[in-house]
Image (cartoon, rainbow, N blue to C red):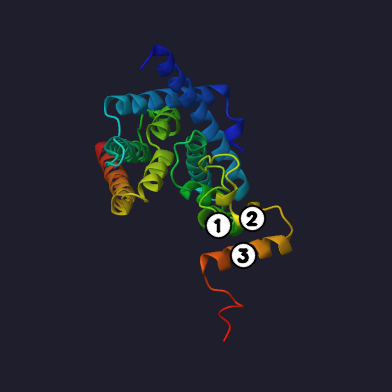
Amino acid sequence: VSTLRREPRWWLEVAAGGAVGTAARAGLLWLAPTQPGAWPATIFAENVLGALLLGLLLGRLERSGAPQWLRSPFFSIGALGSFTTFSNLAWDVSSTVPTAPVLAVGYAAASLLLGLAAAGAGWWLGRRSAR
Amino acid sequence: VTAATFLAVVAAGAVGAVARAALSAVVESRWRRDGAGTLVVNLLGAFALGAWLGSAGHLDTVWLWTIGTGLPGRVHDVLHVDGGAAGPLARRRPPGDADRRAPHHDRRPRWSQRSARRGRRLRSGGASPVRDAP
């Protein structure tokens, strides 16, 4: 339970990051809402972008000399954790399966594969940028 | 989008992030597996979102309920017996519509239910173990 015993500042940073990430996600959804029965492009883009940014961050942190402020949970656990959403992905897939199963399976597969590719590419870029 | 709505979303995001980190830490302190906390948080979040949307009458499927419970008998009830009336995500049906209720909602004694089923089968001209016997 080491995480639970962290100092209040750590939790405050998580909360602040969560607020920022959620606001960004909700803002994008308000700007470009998902249409029923259509490809959930906004959620898809948010998840892939979040995976890319998380990979970038972790790749950068893996190298020595990363600035201390980047290690804050504000970015990883808070902001990027709230910017991406697994529950919305699951909801969109499950609610689309009865009416458009091909779309649902394609969306799930594309989210997973492109998310993995984005995280890997971000990690590679993060390590490369630290040289 | 009003300012109040936006503030509510932001506040909920902060609370959710803290809850996510805390739950993940508790799970990983017990299971000692990397990623176990994230897995539990993701599954719980998907189930909670489905239950919430379903309780408001938005859910047309029982997929999340099925994933959430994993109880074979319950899944059978939800999917096959009465078209979803047993699940918490079921659509509301008119009260008193007894003919559309599932057999397991029938509170009569078993012998009475068997008799009623036999009568319905005979009236509808379906297969009968007595009439169709060789």
Q: Which mark is residue B104?
A: 2
Label 1 neighbour load within 10 Å: few <14, some 14-19, many 20+: some
The one nearer the camera, A110 or B81, is B81
The one nearer the camera, B113 or B23, is B113
Which circle, 2 or 3, is nearer the viewer? Answer: 3
Which circle, 1 or 3, is nearer the viewer? Answer: 3
For label 3, the residue is B119
Label 3 neighbour load within 10 Å: few <14, some 14-19, many 20+: few
Indicate the quadrant where residue B96 lies.
top right
Between discs 2 and 3, the one toward the N terminus? 2
For label 1, the residue is B81
Between discs 1 and 2, the one toward the N terminus? 1
Dot 3: chain letter? B
Q: Is residue B32 visible?
A: no
- Residue type marked 1: Val
**Percent of width and height locating residue B85:** 55, 47
Q: CA distance from mark 1 to mark 2?
A: 8 Å
**Number of residue marks:** 3
User: For the view shown, which residue lies furthest in the bottom direction?
Assistant: B134
- Residue type marked 2: His
Dot 2: chain letter? B
The residue under the point 29% across, 35% down is A35
- Residue type marked 3: Gly
Give the vertical position of A97 relative to A15 (above or below).
Answer: below
